[in-house]
Image: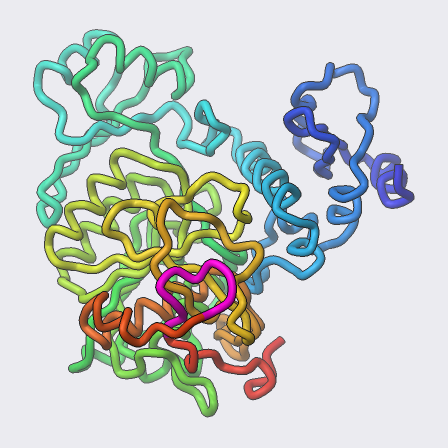
Amino acid sequence: MSSFLKRVVTSGTAVLLVAGVANAQLLPSVGVPSLPPIGVPATGNLPVVGPVIDNVLATPAGREAVAPTLDTVSGLSQNVIDAGPSTLLELRKLRLRELIRQYPRELERDGSGQPVRRGVLVAVDPDPGSLSQAVRAGFRIIGDAREYSLAMRTVTLAVPRGLSARDGLKRLRRIAPTLQADFDHLFEPAGGGLLPFAGALAASAGPRGGPLIGIVDGGVASHPSLGGAAIEQNGFAGRPQPTGHGTAVASLIVGRQGPFQGAARGASLLVADVYGGSRAAGSASSIVRALSWLASKRPQVINISLVGPRNRIVERAISAVRARGINIVAAVGNDGPSAPPQFPASYAGVVAVTGVDSRGRALPEAGKAAHLDFAAPGADMAAALPGQGFARVRGTSFAAPLAAARLALSGSVQRLASEARPGRGRVGRGIVCGACRVDPKTVRAK
């Protein structure tokens, strides 16, 4: 065992073995009981720790990859990236597990370990007979919404007392097999943590004549580069709350301050906040409501720098938005090529975007979507920090808005493809918005 682990064990930190792999997670035990190791008897004996994951977790950046703090938008550090695809995959499993552990009242896991809202299922366009069968079996209707701009209805069901969401879905599919229902999965920012900001939301300067671009993300904070931008914000997990991730993404589209220039300056921005400042938010149902609001505004493009599992409700909403002629751009994620395909980037019709560095090389941490359309700068670049200043950012989260901006300005995927330039590695049809990267040195990024 490393000297680092010896120190943390004696100071009251639990070491967990994950999924039978000799990898460890470091979890503070103060105030929250540690979960028993997966695949290891809860005897109190410490498992053997693998040297690779040991070295990664022995750094602040490695621990943050498992339990992201809320004070950064920078993305994964180089030592985490260099650990390789298998370690990125294990860190992903640890991160999802830790998120559920941190919010036990709000979250539980589905059959694949993905975080879902506890005790809740969502049905889309339920027929009266199936809904009646569900109610007779003990399910309670706790929400019923008609998303007119998507031409769909969602009904939120509480599972019967004593059942998990996973067991509830099994029972629901057995008693009402025609009902289209799914978990209320959580979706994460595809790069960097959410940064709650005590300051103000970015204020709108009024609509402009340029393209209208929507984003589904956290809220956007005030920043000098956004002072003259046309930004309208709406909250779908409570009131909008400014975050680092949302602010960075917005600045890459419409920011303007000295040498820092967004990719679609003069565009108007619609911000759908699906987090309300909480990492336990960002659910499928909130994303559906966000997409419904955005669709009613008729933007040319919607950017989604979030990732999660396949979800029937989100897939239906994405299809409805696309049917209205609105393009959707999504990041492929940063859990490495060994991770399962992430959504919504992997849905048919969604423009899936990966990131490249300043040399045009595909980011090694980029996820592997079911299809890949384009790459855009996703490293060696700057984006706005809430309040003031800039940060170095890395990840597919920050490549997607650049591609979305160019798509809005070019007018079609076909025209965007004509702009694409070759790159190295998996870059889809090529690199777009290659000149949109702002060198961190020019803005003294942190």
Segment tinted magenta in the rendering: 423-432
Where's residue 192, x and y in %?
A: 53, 58
Inspect this view and state whether residue 217 appears. Answer: no
Residue displayed at 22% across by 76% down: 410
Q: How is the image coloured?
A: rainbow
Q: In which quarter of the image is residue 228?
A: bottom left
User: In front here: 347 or 431?
Assistant: 431
Q: Is the magenta stretch mostly helix, strand or loop?
A: loop
Residue displayed at 42% across by 17% down: 164
Where's residue 148, x and y in %?
A: 9, 45
Residue displayed at 39% across by 85% down: 256
Q: Does the magenta stretch include residue 208?
A: no
User: In front here: 289 or 403?
Assistant: 403
Residue displayed at 43% across by 87% down: 257
Q: In which quarter of the image is the N terminus?
A: top right
Is the residue 420 above or below the residue 78 in the image? below
Q: In which quarter of the image is residue 86?
A: top right
Where's residue 375, x and y in %?
A: 41, 65
Using residue 149 as the reference point, say whether residue 41 is left or right of it: right
Inspect this view and state whether residue 81 appears. Answer: yes
Where's residue 203, x and y in %?
A: 32, 74
User: In front here: 253 or 283?
Assistant: 253
